[in-house]
Amino acid sequence: MTIQSALLKGAEILGKAEIGAPRLTAEILLCHALHQDRAYLYAHASEELSEHAWANYDRYLNERLQGKPVQYITHRQEFYGREFYVDESVLIPRPETEHLVEAAIADLRAHPQARALDVGTGSGAIAITLALETGARVLASDISLPALAIAEQNRRRYAAAVSFFAADLVEAIRPGSLDLLISNPPYVPGSDAANMQREVRDWEPHVALFAGESGLEIYERLIAGAEQALKPGGRLLMELGYQSLAGVREMLAGKWTDIRVLEDLAGWPRVICARRPDL
């Protein structure tokens, strides 16, 4: 089978199964099987696939048909212009989270000596990006040891100045020791599981997705912990989940100042920023 015929066959199989973007998905999976880029597919369209490449391509197609996200098949996800290794132990970084990163970059550039912590780091994409973009030394934590192993792998790839450690939110942090706390916490209500895409519900780590029945439980713990961990005047930046703004704003009201909400490109509230009052 030639590269062109394999590509057409893969796109047909995925299309019949109603997999999104079947042609593009087939291209990505075939590139992964061949260890080549997309330009190679068209420059060598008449080239015969080796038995090994075809076996891998067929396996990748079947994994995608079972709902496995492309990123977990290829172990690649781009975030803020860099490629990160991902597997089923970490959440796949989303483009929307780049809004949180941009807010944190602006804060770190305004406060170059800030001691910053990324809570629930997962693949390490947020912490590594902040360190590389600002030159800051960043702390990052996660409750999942497998996730921390992936984060460390990504850190080594870019030689980023990030220190990872295991912790449940901010429980391991000395009170009043941080200037900036950043987090994309779990925020999906447990009741939403039945309505989620199977690629997310069945493959991504539930510890990084679900936050109790209301979806606000982790925010509540995180904000309470941030009140202790941040210095007076310290800043808290969190990604917002769908319909979580009102509940999170209520938690911050009265105890936090300079509360701001940043919208994503679709106009949805995506990031909330707040400052712990000075003493």
Image (cartoon, rainbow, N blue to C red):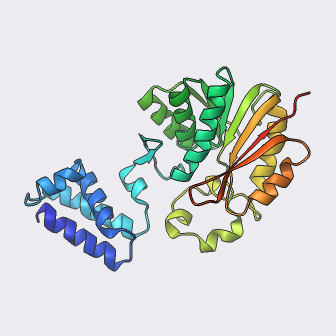
Task: Return the residue nearer the eye: 108 or 126.
Answer: 108
Q: Residue at x 67, y 43 (%)?
A: 183
- Which residue reaches farthest bottom? 16
In this rendering, position of residue 40 left or right of residue 116:
left
In this rendering, position of residue 247 left or right of residue 183:
right
Q: Quadrant of the C terminus?
A: top right
Q: Position of residue 9 (x, y in %)?
A: 21, 72
| Image quadrant where residue 181 sits | top right
In this rendering, position of residue 68 left or right of residue 214:
left
Q: Quadrant of the N terminus?
A: bottom left
| Image quadrant where residue 235 sits | top right
Q: Identify whether 136 is placed above or below 25.
A: above
Q: Identify whether 129 is placed above or below 70.
A: above
Q: Residue at x 46, y 36 (%)?
A: 154
Task: Return the residue nearer the eye: 62 or 263.
Answer: 263
**Residue 235 seen in this snapshot:** yes
Q: Position of residue 94 (x, y in %)?
A: 52, 52
Q: Identify whether 149 is placed above or below 269.
A: above
In this rendering, position of residue 107 left or right of residue 19:
right
